[in-house]
């Protein structure tokens, strides 16, 4: 049995309600039992307890977060009682959405009360899909008609949207879907991104990679839409020809999560399967690391900008250059580069700039 938990988030009037229907139709056909965890903040607002009336925001946000986690845990527990092989739990917003409505002191209070940290609270979801508000690029369609709990003006909706993206930036599987499409196209892009994450084959060219000049680290760290992540990864031997198995520790400031990823190419399509590991499982597998490859230690700066999600990797052995990759919808050709990043050249498809090549012992 495989249970996958994803978040559908986004600014006001982004299309989340319609997206739930699309997700149910698309993935029920693919053999998934699809479960939906409803939006907690809307439940409180509709029940007469709106955020705007509270005099103690940190306590309000704590209770929302606790209720969200309790609902998710209940759905996961029930899902484990099913006979289905594939279960997809879809959360209408996740716990880090609340971060956009708190200052730093309030957010730290919530973390302390829950006895957790930002990494665990953010990354306990398998993937996050952000639908950009219609207020950005499609303001003529921004409306209050389909949500009685909506109160934001266009300007406020844009600020909320920016804050939500910043809150989730740093998650290993964040995808931002903007309004470059018509509405049906936006929904199709969402379904395509979820399908790819769940392991459906996708064209290799959906990822573009660039060799860039060494960036200004201090400037990156000051951007609200940028998050630093520490990564340590190694490679295991595989019995399947052409398959690469990677184990990875990912997090920051002493808080880490652990993953095992299998990658291979079948008929020109990239298939990628990932599973979460415990700390002990990761340590045991590190003892079995392929001696032909050195462990890779790098800093990754996850940057949300231009409706795209960039990974900027800083390797300790490089003093004047770094790598940046971008996931694109359907391998589209136009790439908007982030502000302040100087590209040396594109290296998509060049094996010497892949992580296995960098780790390979000469």
Image: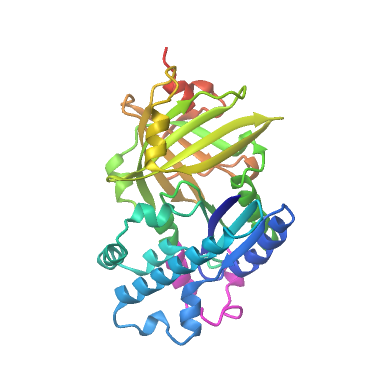
Query: 42 left or right of 59?
Result: right
Residue, x 48% and y 54% (percent of image)?
Answer: 125
Residue, x 42% and y 82% (percent of image)?
Answer: 50
Name the image quarter holding the C terminus.
top left
Residue, x 34% and y 51% (percent of image)?
Answer: 223
Instruction: Kindly give the residue lying farthest to the bottom in the view shown.
Output: 48
Relative height, residue 283 to residue 289 (above, below): below
- Indicate the position of residue 86 as horizontal and vertical percent values: 64, 52
In the image, 292 versus 98, the foreground residue is 292
Relative height, residue 153 to residue 346 (above, below): below
Residue, x 46% and y 27% (percent of image)?
Answer: 235
In the image, 360 versus 82, the foreground residue is 82
Instruction: Kindly give the residue lying farthest to the left in the view shown.
Output: 105
- Indicate the position of residue 266 as horizontal and vertical percent values: 68, 30
Residue 150 part of the magenta segment: yes
Relative height, residue 1 to residue 187 (above, below): above
Instruction: Kindly give the residue lying farthest to the top in the view shown.
Output: 362
Query: 33 left or right of 316?
Result: right
Q: Is residue 42 visible?
A: yes
Q: Is residue 180 visible?
A: no
In the image, 203 versus 145, the foreground residue is 203
Which contiguous range is marked in magenta?
A: 136-161
Residue 154 part of the magenta segment: yes
Query: 131 left or right of 152?
Result: right
């Amino acid at each position: 049995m495989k249970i996958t938990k994803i978040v559908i988030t986004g600014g006001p009037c982004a299309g989340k309600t319609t997206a739930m229907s699309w997700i149910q139709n698309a993935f029920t056909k693919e053999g998934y039992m699809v479960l939906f965890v409803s939006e907690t903040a809307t439940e409180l607002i509709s029940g007469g307890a709106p955020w705007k009336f509270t005099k103690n925001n940190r306590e309000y946000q704590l209770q929302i977060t606790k209720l969200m986690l309790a609902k998710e845990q209940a759905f996961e527990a029930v899902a484990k009682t099913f006979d289905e092989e594939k279960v997809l739990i879809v959360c209408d917003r996740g716990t880090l959405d609340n971060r956009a409505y708190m200052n730093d002191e309030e957010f730290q209070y919530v973390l302390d009360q829950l006895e957790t940290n930002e990494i665990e609270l953010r990354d306990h979801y398998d993937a996050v899909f952000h639908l950009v508000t219609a207020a950005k690029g499609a303001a003529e369609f921004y409306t209050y008609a389909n949500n009685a709990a909506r109160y934001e003006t266009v300007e406020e909706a844009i600020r909320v949207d920016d804050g939500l993206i910043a809150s989730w930036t740093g998650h290993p599987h964040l995808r931002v879907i903007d309004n470059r499409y018509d509405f049906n196209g936006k929904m199709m892009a969402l379904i395509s991104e979820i399908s790819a994450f769940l392991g459906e084959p996708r064209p290799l060219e959906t990822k573009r990679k660039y060799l860039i000049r060494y960036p200004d680290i201090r400037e990156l760290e000051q951007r609200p839409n940028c998050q630093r992540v520490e990564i340590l990864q190694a490679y295991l031997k595989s019995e399947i020809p052409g398959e690469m198995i990677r184990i990875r520790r990912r997090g920051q400031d002493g808080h880490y999560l652990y993953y095992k990823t299998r990658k291979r190419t079948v008929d020109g399509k990239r298939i990628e399967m990932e599973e979460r590991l415990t700390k002990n499982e990761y340590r045991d597998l590190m003892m079995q690391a392929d001696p032909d490859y050195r462990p890779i230690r790098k800093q990754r700066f996850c940057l949300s900008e231009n409706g795209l999600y960039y990974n900027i990797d800083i390797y300790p052995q490089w003093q004047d250059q770094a790598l940046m990759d971008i996931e694109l919808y359907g391998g589209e050709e136009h790439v908007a580069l982030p502000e302040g990043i100087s590209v040396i050249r594109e290296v998509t498809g060049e094996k010497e700039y892949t992580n296995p090549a960098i780790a390979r012992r000469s």
